[in-house]
Image (cartoon, grey):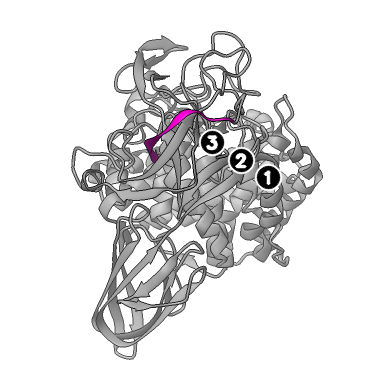
């Protein structure tokens, strides 16, 4: 994919600060131990076992591989290589790589052929394993032959996710430049689903399961034009923005998600969003920003990454939800019918495998791929695309040979808005360094001097540079964002703030369908214990950076998005309101208050970052004075 920016590899780009800590928490939690405790990965057909042999191992490897290499953890790297070696061992002479018999291929949904091809490309980027290009070549050449002869045809998930294979297809064409690769791209495009046919279906919830309104399909689809247009020889038209606007208008949430439990679910704050869609939407935005260079995708990505992703994971990342809600006052099993349109009554619990196991294996791509998007490059230009703490070590050409360039970013963003870039080279080098500045940045200063650059890029032309430092600081204002039902959400920079609801955990240890839930990989109900029926008394807020919460960002025993010790809070004034429960449910607030009139005197509360408030009220009324 040739776009505006190119990604760096995990050899060049490493996380530091709170981002490294978050990856270490992930490695110590469910993601880093799934091959030890979960049959669908531990005993998968992909490695010669008898358990699931479709999407779950590739999903897991898609995040586990970059996690291992970003941390440089030899045990994780060894375990990732074990899976790749096993998968390669089972590749058939004709190139087929998926674990099914030859006579089963026509009924085997080949979406996973596209997925494993992408995973192998991820592994190659991280490891440099010279076996992989030929393996991908044989996988896709075999796929081309089966499709072009009519032996196979895209259907179901493969039909709706036809574009997922283009990550590997683009790499293959850049490497081999053979005509059949372009022909394969055309076949996938022609047999793939045209989403234009379903745009009207996205404008109202439908209480039935369908591929055309399935939330994960839709957020994956957003990158389809960006990854395919070059090799197809078509002009890029920003279809993603067209689709985004419809999805946001009719299904948007305060944290840049679209509701989908498991299909599009409208604008109610008590409908859920599937975790697979969170990480896939992040990945689509990473690709879209790299391809277009349009800052809107990076800014939207930040909101999802710093709010929606941590909110749906336990602090220690041993448990996750299948679906999260904006207004979520308790996560207890529904004893009768489910609140969700097509999900079970356990989908909002935190655990090993609530509802379906796709999210169990897929959620772990979120943080590693975000880390790989911190810095990007094009020709002699490097950009700080996502201002997360990290260090880049790369080579740049000079008249005297290659220079080793080292760029570090020290920051506690998004909790603080201070950024220290330290640039060093082992010999004098000239290049352009850019820093993306978000549209909400106010009073931007560079090395103490005011700059007018909000919503654009700061550009530094470094000539004969061997060492320099750039310090950028800006302010962010609190704003109230309009939501349906005359409600508001509170936003400050990339952080959304919620009224936290205290809770007690009820541990659930059991076995179901041969899968054991046992501490620490058990399930939990989060039972709300504090008052939640409030409205905002006014629109004045005071942001506080919490020293103890910031200290926890580097404390070995602390958590980054802590539900008990958040790094930042907003002081707000609220009043009780008559809100009420959703009809037929004992532990779900109504989608809107019964009354918008405040009761009694206002009181001061602390709003938490959405990602820290596992139970929360995010969409609140602003009460009339």
Q: Is residue 346 above or below residue 80?
A: above
Check if residue 607 falls in the magenta segment. Answer: yes
- Would you name the residue on which mark 1 appears? 247
Mark 3–mark 1 Cα distance, whole angstroms, equals 22 Å
Please give the name of the residue rendered at 54% of the width and 20% of the height, measured from the top-left corner.
Answer: 588
Q: Quadrant of the N terminus?
A: bottom right
Q: Quadrant of residue 461?
A: bottom left
| Image coords of residue 573 (percent x, y) | 42, 39
SS at badge 2: loop
- Would you name the residue on which mark 2 appears? 258
User: Nearer the N terminus, badge 3 or badge 1?
Assistant: 1
Question: Furthest residue to the top?
Answer: 335
Closer to us: 242 or 101: 242
Give the magenta-colored segment's residue range: 597-609
- Would you name the residue on which mark 3 appears? 620
Q: Is residue 323 above or below residue 429?
A: above
């Amino acid at each position: 994919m040739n776009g505006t920016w190119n990604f760096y590899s995990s050899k060049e780009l490493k996380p530091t600060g709170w981002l490294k800590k978050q990856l270490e928490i992930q490695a110590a939690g469910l993601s880093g131990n799934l091959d030890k405790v979960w049959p669908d990965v531990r005993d998968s057909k992909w490695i010669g076992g008898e358990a699931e042999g479709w999407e779950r191992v590739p999903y897991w490897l898609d995040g586990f591989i970059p996690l291992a290499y970003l941390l440089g953890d030899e045990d994780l790297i060894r375990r990732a290589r074990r899976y790749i070696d096993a998968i390669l061992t089972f590749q058939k002479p004709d190139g087929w790589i998926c674990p099914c018999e030859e006579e089963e291929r026509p009924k085997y949904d080949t979406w996973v052929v596209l997925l494993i091809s992408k995973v192998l490309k991820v592994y190659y980027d991280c490891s440099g394993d010279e076996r992989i290009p030929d393996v991908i070549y044989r996988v896709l050449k075999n796929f081309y032959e089966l499709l072009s002869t009519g032996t196979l045809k895209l259907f179901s998930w493969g039909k709706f996710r036809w574009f997922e294979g283009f990550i590997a297809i683009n790499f293959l064409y850049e490497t081999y430049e053979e005509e059949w690769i372009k022909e394969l791209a055309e076949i996938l495009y022609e047999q793939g689903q045209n989403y234009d046919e379903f745009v009207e279906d996205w404008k109202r919830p439908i209480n039935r399961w369908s591929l055309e309104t399935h939330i994960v399909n839709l957020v994956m689809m957003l990158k389809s034009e960006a990854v395919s247009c070059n090799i197809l020889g078509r002009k890029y038209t920003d279809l993603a923005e067209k689709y985004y606007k419809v999805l946001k208008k009719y299904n948007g949430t305060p944290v840049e998600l679209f509701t989908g439990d498991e299909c599009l679910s409208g604008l109610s704050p008590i409908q859920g969003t599937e975790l697979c869609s969170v990480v896939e939407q992040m990945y689509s935005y990473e690709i879209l920003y790299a391809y277009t260079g349009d800052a809107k995708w990076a800014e939207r990505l930040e909101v999802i990454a710093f709010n929606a992703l941590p909110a749906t994971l336990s602090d220690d990342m041993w448990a996750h939800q299948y679906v999260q809600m904006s207004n979520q006052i308790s996560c207890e099993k529904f004893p009768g019918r489910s609140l969700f349109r097509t999900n079970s009554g356990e989908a909002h619990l935190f655990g090993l495998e609530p509802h379906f196991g796709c999210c169990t294996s897929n959620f772990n791509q979120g943080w590693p791929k975000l880390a790989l998007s911190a810095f990007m490059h094009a020709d002699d230009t490097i950009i700080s695309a996502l201002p997360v703490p990290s260090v880049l070590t790369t080579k740049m050409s000079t008249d005297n040979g290659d220079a080793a360039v080292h760029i570090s970013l020290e920051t506690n963003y998004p909790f603080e808005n201070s950024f220290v870039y330290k640039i060093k080279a082992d010999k004098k080098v000239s290049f352009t360094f850019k820093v993306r500045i978000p549209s909400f940045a106010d009073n931007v200063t560079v090395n103490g001097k005011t700059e007018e650059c909000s919503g654009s890029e700061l550009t530094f032309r470094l000539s004969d540079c061997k060492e320099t430092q750039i310090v950028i600081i800006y302010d962010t204002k609190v704003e109230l964002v309009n939501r349906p039902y005359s409600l508001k959400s509170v936003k400050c920079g990339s952080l959304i703030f919620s009224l936290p609801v205290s809770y007690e955990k009820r541990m659930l240890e059991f076995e179901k369908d041969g899968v054991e839930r046992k501490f620490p990989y058990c399930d939990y109900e989060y039972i709300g214990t504090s008052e939640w029926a409030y409205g905002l008394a006014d629109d004045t807020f005071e942001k506080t950076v919490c020293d103890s919460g910031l200290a926890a960002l580097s404390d070995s025993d602390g958590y980054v998005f802590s539900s008990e010790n958040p790094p930042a809070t907003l002081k707000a004034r609220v009043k009780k309101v008559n809100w009420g429960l959703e009809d037929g449910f004992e532990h779900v607030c109504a989608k809107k208050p019964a009354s918008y009139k405040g009761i009694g005197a206002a009181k001061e509360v602390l709003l938490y970052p959405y990602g820290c408030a596992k139970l929360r009220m995010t969409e609140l009324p602003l009460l009339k004075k």
